[in-house]
Image (cartoon, coloured by chain):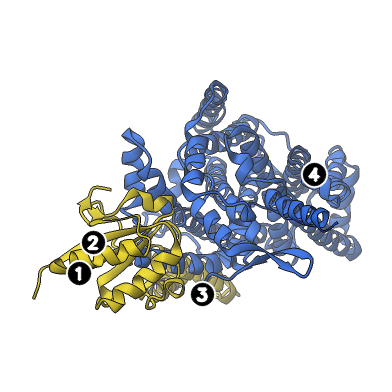
Chain colours: A yellow, B blue
Amino acid sequence: MADQISLLAVFPDLEPAANAIDTLRSLGLSDENMNVISGVPVTEAMLGRPRQWTNVPRLALGGAGGGFLVGTFLVFTPLLYFVPVGGQPTVPGPPSVVILFELTMLGLLISTFLGVFLDSTFPSYRPMEYVPEISDGKIGILYHCPADKEEKFTKAMTALGAERVELAEEQQL
Amino acid sequence: MAATSQHLELSHEERLREQHLMLDPKPRGEMNAMVMEAMHTTSWKFWVMAVLLGGIVLIGLFGAWGYLIAEGLGVAGVNRPSYWGIFLVNTVFWIGISHAGTFISAILRVFKAEFRRPFTRAAELMTTFGLVQAGFSIFMHMGRVWLAYWLFPYPNERQLWPNFHSPLSWDLLAITTYLLASTMYLFLPLIPDMAMARDRSTGWRKNAYKILALGFRGTEGEWTHLRTAMSIFAFAIIPVMFSVHTIVAWDFAAATRPGWSSTIFGPYFVVGALHSGMGAVIMVLAIVRATMKNMKYFIRPEHFDAIGKLMLIISMTWAYFFFNDYIVQWYGGDRWTKELLHWHEAGPMGWMWFLMLIVNVAIPWLVLWNKKWRSTPWVVFVVGLLINVGMYIERYIIIPISLTINRQPFTWRLYKPGIEIPLSIGTLAFFILLYMLASKFIPLVPVWEVQEGQMAHSVKKFGRETVVTVSELD
């Protein structure tokens, strides 16, 4: 098996980037071997890419469950220090709803936030393949291809309008 | 003839582009540079203002608070029967201000109101900084602030446990939840802008932005996780926002005091919060537009027009809830409630009651119906300021003035604030100072959101008519 190299093609716009992805596929690269880097969210549909998987909703749900359990503990704390008051329940219903709601929502939102960190492996301060022009609106296509086919891939990308194609070197952001 | 018609049509399209930010795109690099320049350009006036506000914060907030802690709550005006004074007025007021950020960022995002894009962050910052002031005010009101941990469950020697079923504990939970949620909601869409700032900064700023950008590059996965999280936040934070001010309202409504025991207080407070919050947003936008470089491109009369319409609707809704609350209390005929209503209107502070109605209802209705007026920044700034004065007065009437009248006439006594006045000025100065300093470090305009919106907008011709169209990019 030939050695793999990583290349980064920088496109000025969305349209040539979408065409480049089709071309990379036709040259034998699978979708797992490419990644699109952009300064604005471009959807999978715009680029004809497979749907991205995210665990954030599941983590959010888990967090909501966790928050509900913490809320349940707080709701039932009067049982730990039982003080009977005539005519009043130890664990009253309606106020318990308020506590359960707030803590469930807090759990949901915190876990959603942390979900982004977990799924994106944030924070990550190690060197990565990137060029600062991406936050200026350029679209970067990062792909891994056999080293012996570098020229062929580079030519194809340049023909499709890539402003430059370079070896994707990891650099400090 | 055909040439004239073409010219007219072209100028109509040009006019559309001039009016709407979404139809007037600039290259992303240029927009980034404009936002960075706005952050980096600081005049001497800024620093004079910052030093002045810093002095007020030191003396008015921390100095006066230190004095309050050293001397005890006796130096404040709170006493029988008005145990809740300006501290609580400030708490309710600042929580109200904080509602605007979520309203603009979450509700308008859910409803895909495109005009929100350039100023979501400016509003979200208000939420976080407003809640900080609300939290301060609660701690001031505690007096013995070093015993705040008594609110948490732990087995102490006297077997005193907090009652989590008390409305005041709901407050703690709701405000904490909202503060954390709104801070996270502020931070998530900020990550790409931090990466943008990281890519074009040097020195300490670069290091700071690098830490805050968390290593964001803009890969497909990162955008997917971020957008999914923002969608969840947008939907989930709305009920949290409603719950916060509803729970604050229940602090009053759950008591059986004249004037407070009202089933409509929850929504009435929420609408009041939005009223003052939107007024504050429009003030902030007018100041940002006038004082920060390049902001006239991002914040245009169309935005004041849109917020002005919302303010008008909210003012009408507030008037509806106010009258609904008033007429039921008035019709109820309870002796003490009637006494209180009379006190509101004809007591020594009666002028406040009338001023509240004038600035919360009459002025917004008289001004904001007119498109030209509501598109003029200084006009809506004045209206926003007056609404905030009106809403502060509303809380003042509900809390210390209403507490004056109870079922024990021998305790009736007019509330006179003491140390609360410098503390209130201090919190206001602290809010402005935090905002000013943040505006020099945090990109106030979410550039990627603006660009995303500009990608979705276009001008199309239907027959002879030129119209604006928006595509769903999701």
For marks 1 and 3, give the one nearer the viewer: 1
Q: Mark 1: which secondary structure?
A: strand
Question: Which residue in the structure is indicated by mark 1?
Answer: A145
Q: Is residue B340 above or below residue B467?
A: above
Q: CA distance from mark 4 to mark 2?
A: 84 Å
Question: Which residue in the structure is indicated by mark 4?
Answer: B410
Q: CA distance from mark 1 to mark 3?
A: 64 Å
Residue B426, given in percent of the width and then of the height, sits at 58, 32
Q: Which of the labelled discs sits on residue A7, or is there none? A: 2
Q: Amino acid at mark 2?
A: Leu
Identify which residue is drawn at 34% across, 41% down: B208
Q: Mark 4: which secondary structure?
A: helix
Which of pointers 2 and 3 lies earlier in the amino acid sequence?
2
Q: Disc 2 sits on a residue from what chain?
A: A
* Left or right of B49, for residue B384: right
Mark 3 near mark 4, Cβ–Cβ under 8 Å?
no
Residue B54, given in percent of the width and then of the height, sits at 52, 26
Q: CA distance from mark 4 to mark 1?
A: 88 Å
Label 3 crowd (10 A; few <14 / some 14-19 / many >=20):
some
Q: Mark 3: which secondary structure?
A: loop
* Residue with the most extreme left position: A1
For marks 3 and 4, give the one nearer the viewer: 3
Q: CA distance from mark 1 to mark 2?
A: 8 Å
Q: Amino acid at mark 3?
A: Val
Q: Which of the labelled discs sits on residue B216, or is there none? A: none
Image quarter where the N terminus of chain B lies is bottom right
Q: Which of the labelled discs sits on residue A91, or is there none? A: 3
Name the one closer to the observer, B202 or B394. Answer: B202
For marks 4 and 2, give the one nearer the viewer: 2
* Left or right of A119, for residue B230: right
